[in-house]
Image (cartoon, rainbow, N blue to C red):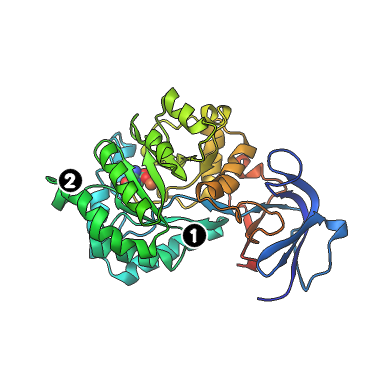
Amino acid sequence: MSGSLLVDNIGELVTNGLGEGPLGIRRDAAVLVEEGRVAWVGAAAYAPAADRRVDAGGAAVLPGFVDSHAHLVFAGDRAAEFAARMAGEPYTGGGIRTTVGATRAASDDDLRATVRRLRGEALRQGTTTMEIKSGYGLTVADEARSLRIAAETSTETTFLGAHVVPAEYADRPDDYVGLVCGPMLAAAAPHAKWIDVFCERGAFDVDHARAILACGQAVGLGVRLHANQLGPGPGVQLGVELGAASVDHCTHLSDADVDALAGAHTTTVATLLPGAEFSTRSPYPDARRLLDAGVTVALATDCNPGSSYTSSMPFCIALAVREMRMTPAEAVRAATVGGARALRRDDVGVLTPGARADLVVLDAPSYLHLAYRPGVPLIRKVLLNGVPQ
Ligand code: NIG
Ligand code: FE
């Protein structure tokens, strides 16, 4: 769609740039969109003329959510495993292999349909950027096709061949690490921007994780990792050491982990995934401790069929506020510009001139309602790259 578009009559505009408070709020504002970008932001009274107009009706407008952690390429579901957990079973990550079996057996079209369904679901809930991982194929061909399919929907694709050691390699994990670093990485890298490892007891230890991430870096992939989800461990500090864009989960952190994340030269974001704690009935990470130490925090869904089958960033915001001692403003920042930092993007998560025109119009007068009215569909309209959806 060509021509300019004015989003007008905005009661509360969250810019994450210049404006009031940590969210850079402007009142009675308007946003001019040209060629998919924000061309102008200012008072509605001074808005320039445009070819078309979207009337926000005095409601709040925010940057679209940036969900920097999702596993959308899979088949089947694990509802029975969820029910067992709610009856007291612990989450161990063991169910990943169940999804691997279903994913390998699925057709390309089935996998594609699931990715599109979940991406559509997320978009309707305000997510305009969504990272997508592989990790349920775990063969050269299945990881490559997972990423090929993911890349049809997102530019933020992540190779997670090191999700778990698949059953056929259970007795020889070193051989599996060799496969991941060799032919699997070679087949995956053309379709991936990032590499990720599940660094956890029962998945990959710190030496394996370091080796795999180094192989990925050597072919130009950026580093992110699953760390400190199920217990304390070396993952977070490994991520900081390697200059990872993000370490994700961060549920069990030592003081040394927090210090490493807060270090003056650290660019690694701590991405918190409260949907996983909700769906595994686990203690939530302590966001307050990270924020008070000056760490950059992102919120993401971790959408996957095992530990967190939600695509809803508003749900994660509400959990973060209620359960993780984040203020509503901190949670909204973490779900927008925080996610952008976790993906090393400066063109999304903000509504300032030059940014992508990815924005949401709420069915509410303020961003506060995202946490205040949990479970309510508050996303009235989404613009993606300047195009109303
Ligand atoms: O981020 N922790 C590892 N991977 C996913 C869970 C995957 C699954 O249980 O299928 C996560 O929570
Ligand atoms: Fe995950």
Q: In this view, does 285 lie to the left or right of 106?
A: right
Q: Mark 2 points at which residue?
A: 173
The image shows residue 10 at horizontal and vertical percentages of 76, 54
Which quarter of the rendering shows the C terminus? bottom right
Q: Is residue 156 visible?
A: yes
Mark 1: which amino acid? Glu
Q: Is residue 284 left or right of residue 341?
A: left
Q: How crowded is mark 2: few (under 14 residues within 10 Å), some or many (20 or more)?
A: some
Mark 2, secondary structure of its residue: helix
- Up-down relation of residue 307 to residue 29 (above or below): above
Mark 2: which amino acid? Pro
View extreme (top): residue: 255
Seen at 39% across and 60% down, the residue is 192
Mark 1, secondary structure of its residue: helix
View extreme (front): residue: 218
Q: Is residue 31 left or right of residue 43?
A: left
Q: In which quarter of the image is residue 36?
A: bottom right
- Up-down relation of residue 370 to residue 182 (above or below): above
- Up-down relation of residue 180 to residue 288 (above or below): below
Asked if disc 2 and disc 1 are in contact, CB closer than 8 Å, the reply is: no
- Up-down relation of residue 218 to residue 88 (above or below): below
The image shows residue 285 at horizontal and vertical percentages of 45, 32
Q: Mark 1 points at which residue?
A: 121
